[in-house]
Amino acid sequence: MALITEQLTRGIAQGPIFSFEFFPPKTESAAAQLLHTAEKLRHSQPDFVSITYGAGGSTRERTLHYASTLQDKFGYEIMPHLTCVGHSKEELRSTIQEFKDAGFKRIMALRGDPPKGEHNFTPHPKGLRHANELVELIRQVHPECAVAVAGYPEKHPEADSPEADLIHLKRKVDAGASFITTQLFFDNSVYYRFVENCRDVGIHVPILPGLLSIASREQAMRFCRMCEATFPEALDKNLLAAGEDPHLLRLAGDQWILEQASDLLQNGAPGIHLYILNQADAALTLHQKLQSSGILPKK
Ligand SMILES: Cc1cc2nc3c(=O)[nH]c(=O)nc-3n(C[C@H](O)[C@H](O)[C@H](O)COP(=O)(O)OP(=O)(O)OC[C@H]3O[C@@H](n4cnc5c(N)ncnc54)[C@H](O)[C@@H]3O)c2cc1C
């Protein structure tokens, strides 16, 4: 079975997964920030890092470029994302081949969101409609690749019901996905319920929880609105109590994520995937605290 599944199922004795998500920068200063963050985080030795793929396929070159940089310059194990948006099947096939040639052993297979200004997802006339079809294509072109797919503990916004969403998630797993990374959530009970529901419908692959490192109350709320995730009252209260003081805000945000991550890892989650928004500090703090409390092993 694929490498990442082995990593994700290797058991607590060898330690859970710790991974980060980057996004490909659009400006020179943002590129410098990414490199700075990659350098700072190198010592935390994440099991892998992922890098997102932009709407409309607009970041294809950038995703490939920065994925290669993160691999070659910093030695990270990479999981580039790939979406169906704006691409024919043949274009997707050739991108998968490029990922394979670059040495990537994992790909996150996504349908993607509609480009800015469009409300509904319209597949390319010669493209793919859903992520399960992309999983199939990746497995054909790059059979030894571990394929991850997205899961939504609070339901994908377009899905008619949580039940329908789970049926579609199972299609992705049946098509050959090795593991699921979740949409962000701030309330662990939604993750535990989601895992239980997945197991009930016969989804047995590892489900890696995705957590957002909190930079500000506004940003956390905006993300929750975008993906229709719950913004817990207690978190709101903590962030409001920190007021405008950036130091207190950081402490409150870091503390919430630490409590979430500790609880998840102590209750059987296979690891933590952190949405770091190309910033190192919250991830470093979390990693250090999880290690010093013995929840993550020292490597
Ligand atoms: C961990 C993670 C990483 C992400 N990374 C990126 C990224 O890099 N770039 C980006 O643009 N977006 C990214 N997204 C956002 C993602 O592209 C959107 O949430 C998108 O709207 C759905 O993508 P999907 O792969 O889940 O689609 P799908 O699995 O295709 O699901 C989309 C909708 O269709 C339904 N559905 C699924 N399969 C079928 C089927 N066979 N028949 C009928 N209905 C079906 C589902 O229930 C759901 O409502 C990410 C999301 C997550 C959780």
Image (tube, grey):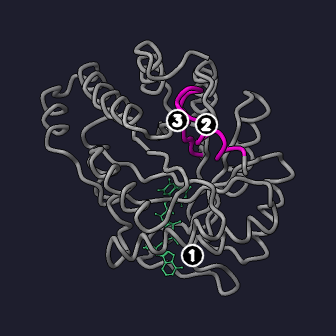
Q: CA distance from mark 1 to mark 3?
A: 28 Å
Q: Which quadrant of the view contains residue 49?
A: top right
Quadrant occupied by the C terminus: top right
Q: Amino acid at mark 1?
A: His
The disc, 1 or 3, on the residue closer to the chain's N-terminal end is: 1
**Residue under the point 74% across and 65% down:** 138
Q: Name the residue at 60% across, 72% down.
A: 132
- Report the label total: 3
Give the left or right position of residue 51, taking residue 260 as reference: right
Residue 272 position in % (x across, y down): 47, 37
In the displayed structure image, the side of residue 208 where residue 47 appears, left or right: right
Hey, what amino acid is under mark 2? Arg
Residue 282 vertical placement versus 135 (above, below): above
Residue 98 appears at what percent x and percent y?
82, 56
- Give the mark nearest the N terminus, 2 or 3: 2
Identified at 58% across, 51% down, the residue is: 52
Residue at position x 79%, y 69% from top? 140
Residue 130 marker:
1
Q: Nearer the viewer, mark 2 or mark 1?
A: 2
Residue 239 numbered mark, or none: none
Q: Which mark identifies residue 278?
A: 3
Residue that carries the numbered disc 2 in the rendered image:
10
The residue stretch that appears in magenta: 3-23
Mark 1 within 8 Å of ligand 1, using the beta carbon: yes
Q: CA distance from mark 2 to mark 3?
A: 28 Å
Q: Mark 3, residues whose alpha carbon is within 10 Å: few (<14), some, or many (≥20)? A: many
Residue 240 placed where, x, y %?
Answer: 14, 33
Q: Is disc 2 placed on a helix, strand or loop?
A: loop
Vertical side of 239 occupied by 61: above or below: below
Q: Is residue 2 above or below residue 276?
A: below
Q: What amino acid type should be assigned to the residue bearing mark 3?
A: Asn
Q: Is residue 292 left or right of residue 34?
A: left
